[in-house]
Image (cartoon, rainbow, N blue to C red):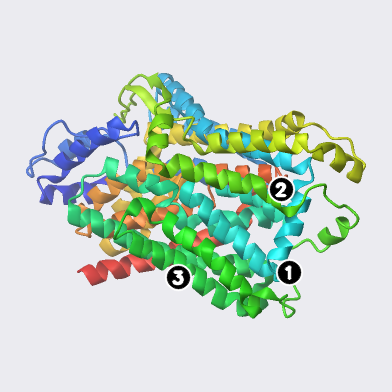
Amino acid sequence: MALTWINAALADNWSLAAIHRRAGRRDRVGMTVVALPRRVPNPSWSEEEILQIMELPVDLLHWSLASLPILALAVLMVNLRWTAQQAGAAGIFIAAAVAFFIFKTPMSTLAVAGAKGVWDAIFILYVIWPALLLYQIMNQAGGYDALRRGITRMSRNELFIIVALGWVFASFLQGIDGFGTPIAVVAPLLVAFGVRPVYAVAIPIIAHIWAKFFGTLGVGWLATLQVVDLDEATTLATAYQSGLLIIIQAVLGGFTIVWMYGRWPAIRHAWPLVLIIATIQGVGQLLSTLVDPALAAFLPATAAMLALYPLSRWRRYAQPATDIVDRPAMRESHADSAIGRTPPMGSAMSFFPYVLLTVLALGTSMIEPLKAVLAGVTFGLPFPAVTTGYGVTNAAIPVYSALKPLTHPGASLIVTAVVTWCLYRARGYYEAWSMTTGTKPVGVLRGLLESAVPASVPIVAFLVMAALMSHSGQNDTLALGIAAIAPAYAFAFLSNGIGIIGAFTTSSSTSSNVLFSDLQVTLARLKGLPEATILAAQSAGGAIGNAIAPANVVMGASTAGISGQEGAILRKTLPWTLFAFLLTGVATVLLVVLAA
């Protein structure tokens, strides 16, 4: 099957040389590259000579085995209902076995990959631990009960509040922070409001996907430009078409969370609200790509936040929706359980941590002098060059994926947590809430350890598994296999699926683009497809895949207090992912046809 696209390369004498040049760029960011030719191939070379150049095997056996770790995770967590810890351990074992026995990956390469996976996990754990610390500080002081009361005063319409928190606020956080912050922050807020924990995690996961690629002030977009060589016109077209495809995620995400809340009656009630917000977010992001892609998610996410106030004054959403009887996402007994439990703080104090978090995130992201000073503190680890028997090579890296601890979202969360704890303690909220509930507080640090340790184990496991697949060439085999069997239009339809695979295995849309953007551009050229369209599909797919990314699911489950129910969350997000994949595939083909 590898010959399908290798032979196509012979038609363009430049193509494999271009691949080799781009491989050098990917070396610098420390990602897996396929062993590529040291010389430009001659069109008269035989298939055997071409196969010697393209050492990585791309056939049905190797493709099937490369997909085995991913399939195992899906089956174990969704069908067999294994916990994330159990499935993560199994995933490491399967990925390592396939790498060692099938992809000729030596133990030294596996060791380096495993160490990189652990280091990659630190970036996510740096959000989870502070987020769980803030959760314990809020919860043990009665902050969430006070917050629930304050939220209900915003509007008497329950569905409007869920849209405001689960969709609009989560997207706003993604625009400035990312790294799972929207899930870690919003999930406990929804639980406090009365949403069932599984839905409380699934809703922000799905709803903020539209802001993934251009979110965190454009980190995914900027990372993509680091690993592909595009002219100015193609760069502009890629940004614009990415925004065009991502409109699907904004509209589909809004309708999905409304459906989760109350099925068809909720859709009939909220469709104007969904279309207004989706237009602000999706079309706003599309137009913002023409101005500054780095702000393409932040600007419309902020506009949607500002639009909540006039929308809340609309009588349709200011009053309760009496026609929505069945509400599967809500806990009917939640309000009753809170009767007689008056929290010791008012609404303003319960909202204080999230106001402070927003101010800190904006300050460290947008005040350039402050950002420059804080970004000066950075550290990373050196790793040696490693390779496999098939020539999949990772260059030596003096500083791998450097961590900037003071500009990372975890820093804003830590400062927020510490300031909030000092304020709440000084006001005596912990003692007052303990007397109100009649329970002895477990202590903030003890509560943190009891929740954070179980959440950390599977995240480390998933990131180690991702690194094993990357360093052994399994990810490249998956992508090349899809390209090898698919004609041009079929490949255009499937191209966003490669992005989904990358995000699922790495739990990061940015990592998915770093892994596969270069390959997608090369395959687009070989198949005669517009590079901008295929790269836009990769970017959209990388965002979509975050809805089923195991680390995101674990993060949400831990902050919502339902560790071990990750499979139940995936059963909520997987249908949306499949539907988004299909719609994006169709839209990609239409863009290709229009460009023809």
Give the amino acid at mark 1: Arg
- For residue 279, which numbered disc appears in the image? 3
Instruction: Please provide percent x and percent y for residue 299.
Output: 42, 58
Q: How far apart are marks 1 and 3 (CA)?
A: 26 Å
Give the amino acid at mark 2: Met
Q: Horizontal placement of 26 versus 568: left or right?
A: left
Say if residue 364 shows up in the picture.
yes
Q: How crowded is mark 1: few (under 14 residues within 10 Å), some or many (20 or more)?
A: some
Judging from the image, what secondary structure is the residue with disc 2 in?
Answer: helix
Nearer to us: label 3 or label 2: 2
Tell me which corner region of the image, top left, top right, bottom left or bottom right, holds residue 563: top right
Q: How many labels does the image show?
A: 3
Q: Name the residue under label 2.
A: 349
Residue at the spot 73% in from the left edge and 75% down from the top edge: 320
Relative depth, front residue between 45 and 161: 161
Q: How far apart are marks 2 and 1 (CA)?
A: 30 Å
| Badge 2 or badge 1: first in the primary sequence | 1
Q: Mark 1 points at which residue?
A: 327
Relative depth, front residue between 410 and 234: 410
Judging from the image, what secondary structure is the residue with disc 1 in?
Answer: loop
